[in-house]
Image (tube, rainbow, N blue to C red):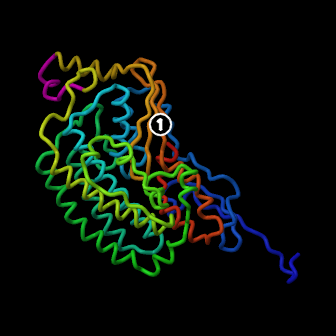
Amino acid sequence: MPENGLRTETMVLNFGPSHPATHGIIHLKLELDGETVVGFVEEPTIGYLHRGMEKLAENMTFHQWITMTDRMNYVSAPLNNIGYTLAVEKLLGVEAPKRAQYIRVILSELSRIADHLVCVGINAVDLGAFTPFLWGFQQREMIYDIFEKYIGARLTTTISRIGEMRYDFDKDIIYMIKCVLDELEPVIAEWDQLLTRNRIWIDRTRDVGVISKEDALDWGFTGPCLRAAGVPWDLRIEEPYLVYNELDFDIPVGTQGDVYDRYLVRVEEIRQSMKIVRQALEKMPEGPIRIEDSTVVLPKHEEIYNKMESMIADFKFVMHGIRAPEGEVYGRTEAANGELGFYIVHKGGRSPYKIHVRPPCFYLYSAFEKLIKGRMIADVISVMGSLNIIAGELDR
């Protein structure tokens, strides 16, 4: 019994699984001392959105499983699609034509921009700033208009193909991309005016959810959260893929590893992605967008509809899939939240023996207790938004 005669105890608060600030089905049991987070009563409960994606791969062809990647980080699905197809191409030992690689880079960076727009906008909404969210979401919808124009889908795009891109860019799509980039410039400038030097925003984000570069590496952080901690690691630079080694861009790096730095890094990454897209549009060569290998790519539509042989080849290809060599590969790309890896094991037949996904969110979320321990309960919202936890990617 304390000297003042008052008995004190902590309380348990259920945060989620249905809470607007989790932006997905995530469940925490927080132990609170007043409004201070003492820690977790038990490990966070995940798996509410588990759909057995990796197990499904064992009964699907390599092409069919592209649709599963849409359902991971559904905010930037093209990054998932392209990362997976690159891993399969690594297994096959093939490389898409140069023009297709430039198209992939452009679509990837537009997806990264859309993801960061949503992340920063939603984080601002959670802390009471609604206007930046509306501005950012408008630009995000314009990017989705480009996806819809290109492939016919907005959210779950299945935008990439193994060894090819199904469609080429026409002048209308290129015009739409340039319009988005032009309109995005003033939006980012307005974000700077509204948030970067805003005293309320700074008080809610600076020195909140701090992680050192050493701890970030130990926990397996990648992407903007790792770079915000001061580690200049970006797979587009360290292990270049597609045509990133032909493009000039910078890696934004923070110093404090807090929520504020994670915000600054993502905003600067939007600018760098815009720079990449502009260069890619300028440098994109003419030429084919598919390899000429009938064992890897589907016949062209016009051939399927007009030639018996192509129709039969298409039927057999869809039924039996790619005849990939036996082996195992690990392909990784720089997705919006960090390193997205696909470990593929193939032992012959139409389906992979095993596909394991390395989602960046899983490692970020593992360190969540460390980031919020000793902070106020209001900081839980701030930190979770800055990590950009996507339940579909986390649970798979």
* Magenta part of the chain: 298-308
Q: Nearer the viewer, residue 158 or 294?
A: 294
Indicate whether residue 301 is drawn in magenta: yes
Q: Position of residue 73 (x, y in %)?
A: 42, 48
Q: Is residue 388 visible?
A: no
Indicate yes or no whether the magenta region holds residue 252: no
Task: Count residues near mark 1 (Cα–Cα under 10 Å), then give few for <14, some for 14-19, many for 20+.
Answer: some
In the depicted view, which residue is nearer to us: 36 or 28? 36
Q: Quadrant of residue 266?
A: bottom left
Q: Nearer the viewer, residue 133 or 242?
A: 242
Q: Nearer the viewer, residue 347 or 94?
A: 94
Tell me what residue is drawn at x 28 percent, y 24 percent: 296
Position above or below: 165 against 206: above
The image quarter containing residue 159 is top left
Percent x, y for residue 195? 39, 75
Farthest residue, direction bottom: 4
- Residue at horizontal 44 percent and vertical 34 percent from the top: 330
Read off the residue under disc 1. Answer: 53
Residue shown at 61% from the left, 72% from the top? 376
Question: x, y (%) of residue 336?
Answer: 39, 52
Report the side of 296 relative to 91 (left or right). left
Residue 226's spot in the image, x, y percent? Answer: 48, 56
Q: Quadrant of the N terminus?
A: bottom right
Whether residue 12 is visible here, answered yes or no, is yes
Going by the image, does 175 lie left or right of 161? Answer: left
Q: How many marks?
A: 1
SS of the residue under disc 1: helix
Q: Magenta region, mostly helix, strand or loop?
A: helix
Q: Give, as a three-letter code, the residue at label 1.
A: Met
* Corner quadrant of residue 122: bottom left
